[in-house]
Amino acid sequence: MLIVRTVKCLALAALCSAPLSAAEFAASYLYSAPSKSDPGNEIVQHESSAKVSFDVVPLGAAGWGLALGGSGQLNAWDFDEPAVPDVQLYKITAPLKLTVFPNPHFGFIATIEPGLHTDFDSVGSDDVRLDGSLLGVWVATPKLQVIAGVAYADDLGKAQVIPVAGVIWDATERLHVEAIFPSLTTTYAFAEKWRARAAVMAAGGEWNWTFNGASGNVEIDAMLKGWRAETGIDRLIAPDTWLTVKAGYEFARELELKRADGTGTTAKLDLVDSAYGAIAIAGKF
């Protein structure tokens, strides 16, 4: 989730009454391939994403901040099932984020994220969705923040209300932990410009897909469920800019294709587990 990834810096900025960086950016590419043969349930996935956010009103001594952003994600799926055509699915969103800290120890973050979740074959109202979240942040200590709230998102495989709760903890000067459902990430700074990382996270999504079947075009809700476990290395390549290389495993995966008009299910695939590799860059300017 977009908000969860920024909670720590927001909380610490409120704590010290210091403004955040004016802008943040990130981009990544992931390649996933089946770990075993299971005809009819195999999928090769290419996932590319990019995002940027800007502080319209920097969070500082005033106790509140406003940020605008934009993000894009492309999921290209290659199926081995002849009845299911290969497809490219997109998520284009424009999040608006309000952060308020009335005092140094407590605040909240509200986000609305309108966007398109589509194959761009035939864009209509079914392709438009409004995601969002409302999170409370308690700065228990300078090294521990507690987060609780709710989000409307598709991380678990379909757009739905998801409870969000967990902690962000600087266990030591080198070890950092973000345990916020539905993800867990740890990083360990083993050298001045190097970090090791490990993570487990939900890897679902929902898109509107104009399915070109034998009987003609059908509007489909494509719902992908699954989880990822990964490990990797971060390298500081410029001030506030990290390059990440990681490898992982996707499991508990299911793809359900339902008619958008609610009249039935077109297909349901129990996808085989997949191994993946990814490269990412993220920073501030």
Image (cartoon, rainbow, N blue to C red):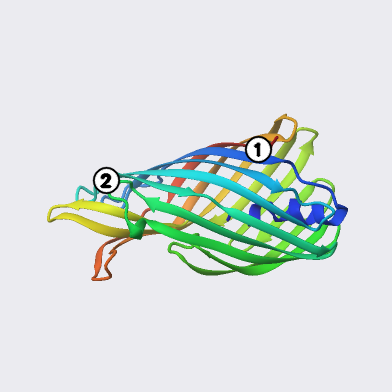
The answer to whether 105 is drawn above or below residue 203 in the figure is below
* Residue 68 spot, x, y in % from top left: 61, 48
- Between 38 and 19, the one nearer to me in the picture: 19
* Residue 3 spot, x, y in % from top left: 63, 56
Amino acid type at mark 2: Asp
From the viewer's perspective, tell me whether residue 121 is left or right of residue 152: left
Which quadrant of the rendered structure holds the N terminus?
bottom right
The image quarter containing residue 78 is top left
Residue 233 is tagged as 1
Within 10 Å of disc 2 (Cα), the crowding (few <14, some 14-19, many 20+) is: some
Q: Which residue is mark 2?
A: 80
Q: Earlier in the sequence, mark 2 or mark 1?
A: 2
- For this orientation, the residue located farthest to the left is 215
* Residue 90 spot, x, y in % from top left: 40, 46
Residue 121 is tagged as none
Query: Measuring 86% from the left and 52% from the top, which residue is drawn there?
Result: 17
The answer to whether 241 is drawn above or below residue 81 in the figure is above
Within 10 Å of disc 1 (Cα), the crowding (few <14, some 14-19, many 20+) is: some
User: SS class of the residue under badge 2?
Assistant: loop
* Residue 112 spot, x, y in % from top left: 56, 59
From the viewer's perspective, tell me whether residue 144 is left or right of residue 37: right
